[in-house]
Amino acid sequence: MSGFLPDEPSAEVRVSPNFGPRRETLRPDMIVLHYTGMATGAGAEAWLCDPASEVSSHYLVHEDGRIVQMVRESDRAWHAGKGSWFGRADINSCSVGIEIVNPGHTLGYPGFPRGQIDAVIGLCKGIIGRHPIPAQRVLAHSDVAPGRKIDPGEKFPWQVLFAAGVGHMVTAAPIRRGAVLKAGDAGAEVEVLQSMLALYGYGVEISGVFDRQTEIVVEAFQRHFRPRLVDGVADGSTIRTLQRLLASVRTVLPR
């Protein structure tokens, strides 16, 4: 493929060879946000278009707000890797991937410039206008691949996106001293916690045992919805925030 017209009118096109046909679905119903985790945006753009990398994304958003489209929305980009949401493992086939230029946790992890975030918001709105994507399916890479990935991380301004009409958020419950659920705990309360996380979409086994996977999923939840403290401990703030999220979901339609 030598080129294509961009789905997003404001985007430049730089074609990546790393894509294929979507499987089991004709249209995406999820957006997955990433950070690039590389020293420069130019390096990340080149890597996503290098056949040797075997990775790609539909879009890349540079720090200055410039948008580059590398894969058509109708095609399957190779951005999410192994993960799951509502039990579906092939995230690439049901999603549009957006890479946001940021060096990430291992290279200093600066904040995201407002111009870049404004571009992400506009891009997400365009994608949502073209595809049936519910608010609660605008997700972090860390949501669909907890433990394996932590991007775009706790500094990503989800509340700014939500205020602009993108994604699903609630006000996080205050952090206070009190009873917690943590690694090694077991019983009905742990089972309820796991059930609530699974009901929102996270890949967690409902076993009644607060094992390492449960701890990892709690960390992923906190990183997105309660970023003030990411520790994998299900304190009252974490549980109440999760309850608020579930109560505010109008429709949850796993596809």
Image (spheres, grey):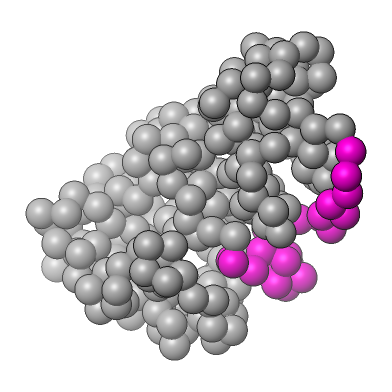
Residue in the foreground of this view, choosing between 91 and 187:
187
Q: Quadrant of residue 246?
A: top right
Residue 129 in picture, x, y percent from top left: 60, 63
Residue 99 in picture, x, y percent from top left: 40, 64
Which residue sits at x=49%, y=32%? 84
Residue in the foreground of this view, choosing between 200 and 102:
102
**Residue 2: in magenta span:** no
Can residue 141 be seen?
A: no
Which residue sits at x=37%, y=62%? 106
Quadrant occupied by the C terminus: top right
Question: Vertically, is 223 above or below 122?
Answer: above
Asked whether, in this view, residue 88 is left or right of residue 194, the answer is left
Question: Vertically, is 87 above or below 48?
Answer: above
Residue in the foreground of this view, choosing between 237 and 40:
237
Q: Main secondary structure of the magenta part?
A: loop
Quadrant occupied by the N terminus: bottom left
The span shown in magenta is: 155-178
**Residue 163: in magenta span:** yes
Which residue sits at x=59%, y=84%? 114
Q: Quadrant of residue 143?
A: top right
Asked whether, in this view, residue 123 is left or right of residue 91, the answer is right
Residue 228 in picture, x, y percent from top left: 71, 59
Residue 23 in picture, x, y percent from top left: 36, 34
Can residue 19 be seen?
A: yes
Asked whether, in this view, residue 7 is left or right of residue 137, the answer is left
